[in-house]
Image: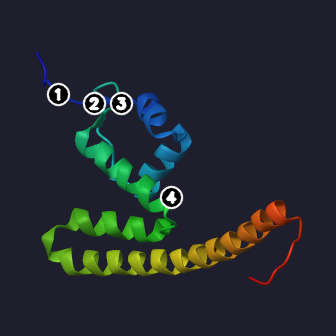
């Protein structure tokens, strides 16, 4: 009767669910950002629950600006097993530092925008635009 699985999606369904193109998913698999995806006997990608977790991780990390190279190294190390735990931890720490640096830039930009918006809102109320609080 074949193996019954509680959860699987075709590539089209994964694309729709995560708003990502099939080309991007195939690229992630080809370069190793996600491990090789399960396939049906016919060769069609059959995303099982574990595959979906990897896809979610890749999308989250890429959205945060984590370089593809770090993700590739992480997946490669993961596949090598528990003897790479320290190396994986170091990669994640590196990714975290990169995200924190980017966050600082966004926080500074938000402060500047908030200041300018506040000045314009005051100008709308008073009819006078001033850049001094």
Mark positioned earlier in the residue sequence (4 or 1): 1
The residue that mark 1 highlights is 5
Q: Which mark is residue 8?
A: 2
Mark positioned earlier in the residue sequence (2 or 4): 2
Query: Counting other residues with Cα less than 10 Å from the Cα at mark 3, is it few (<14), some (14-19), or many (20 or more)?
Result: few
Vertical side of 36 occupied by 81: above or below: below
Vertical side of 112 occupied by 68: above or below: above
Disc nearest the viewer among 3 and 2 = 2
Give the number of callouts. 4
Percent position (x, y) of residue 47?
Answer: 32, 36
The residue that mark 4 highlights is 63
Circles 4 and 1: CB distance less than 8 Å? no
Vertical side of 45 occupied by 128: above or below: below
Q: Is residue 120 left or right of residue 61?
A: right
**Which quarter of the rendering shows the C terminus?**
bottom right
Q: Nearer the viewer, residue 12 or 17?
A: 17
Q: Is residue 67 left or right of residue 93?
A: right
């Amino acid at each position: 009767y074949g193996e019954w699985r509680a959860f699987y999606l075709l590539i089209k369904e994964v694309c729709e669910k995560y708003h990502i193109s099939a080309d991007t998913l195939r690229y992630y698999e080809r370069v190793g950002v996600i491990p090789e995806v399960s396939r049906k006997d016919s060769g069609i990608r059959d995303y099982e629950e574990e595959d979906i977790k990897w896809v979610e991780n890749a999308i989250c990390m890429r959205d945060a600006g984590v370089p593809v190279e770090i993700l590739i190294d992480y997946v490669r190390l993961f596949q090598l097993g528990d003897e790479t735990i320290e190396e994986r931890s170091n990669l994640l720490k590196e990714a975290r530092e990169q995200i924190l640096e980017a966050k600082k830039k966004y926080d500074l930009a938000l402060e500047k925008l908030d200041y300018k918006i506040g000045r314009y809102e005051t100008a709308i109320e008073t009819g006078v635009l001033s850049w001094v609080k």
